[in-house]
């Protein structure tokens, strides 16, 4: 399946098991485990962006789609579009880490990155996974080279997050040779210049299905370009289907099974979006550091001021944790996919099943990294001061471009519900021993404090896991099966769960790096700040599910579980900032 794979020691742990199991540093995949081939692909991609994309940024942002199209074709010539396409159909059939490396490395100009990622992800993968041999033979070689550009049309004006409530309809023609589609799609990336669209509609108003529609098909037309807050250089148009006649052989997958295509594709999109956000954050931080070193105030560079250093430290710690949780997730996915013969019958379904195992981790990567990027670009605007608000400087565009990531690939609100809901669903089905772990924590806290065998960041990690499980247990006891209807509580629990994953991933990576002082300082710094977020979220949950004496008792337990000696985050922050300032960029 892949030409380069994670280290053999990487463990394909069960999805969500991080919350109830203690992991080892040697079991996870990190950026430091990249193969030489993956490093070369990252360099090739970065060089292309620096030498070809960034010089054309003004034209791309002005919606000169001829330039965008030509640059996309060049990524095809470099093989960057072919990473996820099987070799049988002109692709490279590489692993998911390599796919994420490309997504991260191409992210310096968001408008171009969005066009590229929409094509290689949601524009191509539905055919890779669900296409018939004839569909794959016809379309994948063109998509792999950039001769054709792909797009994905799921959203509608009345059904964004509620995708299955689409109004677009399809009926079979009297002669049985075509499906006739009517409806309108909204916010479709690449729609102004794409050649092939995966479009979702309900056959006879009931069977949610997907169709492959080529540009120029009678009855199919893109609407005008949207004028957007950010990613202004990407194409975003509505699509109008008016008695659009689609050949029956262009039905993608099975009639009535379109939801498998719609939702399984999103897991890949979510971890790749996480990687892209990490790349964008790294680029913005570098710009912020360079400006802070050059800008003088009160007789010295502003990078010498403590409050600027605090911002730089928060950015560096966020990037480190984001890298750690994203590549940990993708490493587990690649380990789980090891041994699958992609050419065998039923391979696509098995691949999707194994990726779906990590739906929680994929959603965490999407939510956590998109919000981390928002924090970074906000800090960088502040570092630039007034210049950060001016279009001629890079901070302004990065700030606007970042905002869409919390909406892409399922809103962060929807993904928070997925994180908690999916874990609870697996627990109820007996696929994850979450309920026994919650019962154990409930028994432990009621019987008094247990001896703590951990020290430093590991001690804080153990506390955050207990806090999260205790809050989940209290919420489950209160609402039982109706917990899913309590969205605020579900989201607060998702924040606890996500922080556990981010903190543990950062700590494990730092341990794996051994004597790297910057990594260990960041892990300690991040853990100290993370437990405060978890405690706050746990308090929110307990206050919503208990009252009176029970509330006082449970809040006392929260305080006991969260009790710790605070780290000197000011000193750690200065140490982290000094390191990145000296390097002129995010660096370990």
Image (tube, rainbow, N blue to C red):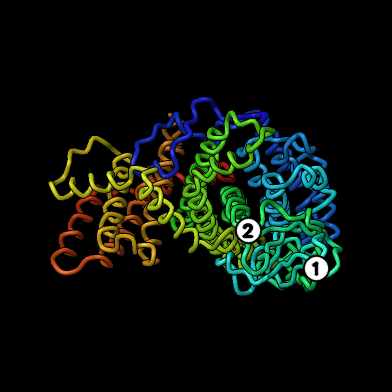
**What residue is shown at x 26% (from left), y 65% (from top)?**
545
User: Tag 2, which secondary structure?
Assistant: loop
Q: How many labels does the image show?
A: 2
Quarter that holds the N terminus? top right
> x, y (%) of residue 497?
39, 51
Decide if residue 25 is on the left or right side of residue 333.
left
**What residue is shown at x 48% (from left), y 56% (from top)?**
311
Q: Could you say which is closer to the camera, residue 299 or residue 72?
A: 72
Q: Looking at this view, name the residue that lies furthest to the front.
A: 175
Q: Disc 1 to disc 2, how far (Cα)?
A: 19 Å
What label sits on residue 176 in the rendered view?
none
What residue is shown with label 1? 244
Q: Looking at this view, name the residue that lies furthest to the top.
A: 8
What residue is shown with label 2? 256
> x, y (%) of residue 100?
62, 43
Against 477, is 463 above or below? Answer: above
Crowding around mark 1 (Cα neighbors within 10 Å: few <14, some 14 to 19, many 20+) is many
> x, y (%) of residue 240?
76, 72
Looking at the rendering, which quadrant does residue 92 occupy?
Answer: top right
- Camera sees residue 144: no
- Camera sees residue 518: yes
> x, y (%) of residue 21?
35, 38
Q: Which of marks 1 and 2 is nearer the N terminus?
A: 1
Against 436, is 254 above or below? Answer: below
Are dots 1 and 2 in contact, CB under 8 Å?
Answer: no
Looking at the rendering, which quadrant does residue 389 occupy?
Answer: bottom right
Crowding around mark 2 (Cα neighbors within 10 Å: few <14, some 14 to 19, many 20+) is some
Against 78, is 374 above or below? Answer: below
**What residue is shown at x 30% (from left), y 64% (from top)?**
540
Decide if residue 244 is on the left or right side of residue 109.
right
């Amino acid at each position: 399946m892949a030409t380069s794979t994670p280290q053999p020691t990487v463990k394909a742990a069960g999805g969500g098991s991080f919350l109830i199991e203690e992991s080892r540093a040697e079991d996870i995949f990190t950026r430091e485990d990249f193969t030489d081939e993956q490093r070369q692909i990252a360099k090739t991609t970065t060089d292309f962006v620096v030498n070809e994309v960034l010089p054309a940024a003004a034209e791309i942002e002005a919606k000169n789609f001829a330039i965008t199209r030509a640059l996309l074709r060049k990524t095809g010539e470099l093989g960057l579009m072919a990473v996820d396409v099987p070799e049988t159909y002109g692709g490279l059939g590489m692993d998911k880490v390599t796919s994420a490396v490309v997504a991260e490395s191409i992210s310096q100009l968001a408008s171009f990155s969005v066009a590229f990622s929409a094509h290689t992800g949601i524009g191509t993968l539905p055919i890779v996974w669900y296409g018939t041999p004839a569909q794959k033979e016809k379309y994948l070689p063109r998509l792999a080279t950039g001769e054709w550009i792909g797009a994905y049309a799921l959203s509608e004006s009345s059904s964004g997050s509620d995708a299955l409530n689409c109004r677009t309809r399809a009926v079979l023609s009297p002669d049985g040779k075509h499906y006739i589609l009517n409806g309108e799609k909204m916010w479709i990336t690449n729609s102004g210049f794409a050649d092939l669209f995966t479009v979702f509609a309900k056959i006879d108003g009931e069977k949610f299905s997907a169709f492959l529609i080529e540009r120029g098909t009678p009855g199919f037309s893109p609407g005008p370009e949207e004028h957007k807050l950010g990613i202004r250089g990407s194409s975003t148009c509505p699509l109008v289907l008016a008695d659009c006649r689609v050949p029956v052989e262009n039905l993608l997958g099975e009639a009535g099974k379109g939801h498998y295509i719609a939702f399984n594709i999103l897991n890949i999109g979510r971890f790749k979006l996480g990687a892209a956000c990490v790349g964008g954050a790294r680029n913005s931080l570098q710009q912020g550091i360079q400006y802070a070193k050059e800008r003088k105030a009160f007789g010295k560079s502003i990078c010498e001021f403590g409050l600027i250093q605090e911002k730089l430290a928060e950015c560096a710690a966020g990037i480190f944790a984001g890298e750690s949780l994203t590549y940990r997730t993708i490493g587990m996915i690649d380990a789980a996919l090891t041994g699958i013969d992609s050419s065998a019958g039923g391979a696509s379904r098995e691949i999707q099943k194994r990726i779906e195992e990590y739906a929680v981790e994929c959603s965490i990567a999407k939510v956590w990294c998109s919000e981390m990027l928002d924090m970074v670009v906000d800090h960088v605007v502040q570092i630039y001061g007034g210049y950060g608000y001016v279009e001629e400087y890079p901070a302004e565009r990065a700030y606007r471009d970042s905002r869409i990531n919390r909406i892409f690939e399922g809103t962060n609100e929807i993904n928070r519900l997925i994180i908690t809901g999916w874990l609870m669903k697996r627990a109820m089905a007996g696929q994850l021993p979450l309920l026994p772990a919650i019962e154990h924590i409930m028994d432990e806290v009621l019987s008094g404090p247990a001896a703590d065998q951990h020290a430093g960041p590991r001690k804080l990690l153990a506390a955050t896991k207990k806090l999260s499980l205790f809050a989940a247990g209290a919420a489950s006891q209160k609402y039982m099966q109706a917990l899913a209807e309590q969205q605020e509580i579900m989201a607060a629990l998702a924040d606890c769960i996500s922080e556990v994953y981010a903190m543990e991933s950062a700590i494990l990576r730092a341990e794996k790096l051994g004597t790297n002082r910057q990594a260990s300082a960041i892990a300690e710094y991040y853990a100290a700040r993370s437990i405060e977020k978890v405690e706050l979220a746990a308090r929110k949950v307990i206050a919503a599910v208990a009252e009176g004496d029970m509330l006082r008792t449970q809040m006392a337990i929260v305080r006991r579980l969260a009790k710790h000696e605070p780290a000197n985050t000011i000193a750690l922050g200065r140490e982290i900032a000094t390191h990145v300032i000296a390097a002129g960029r995010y660096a370990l």
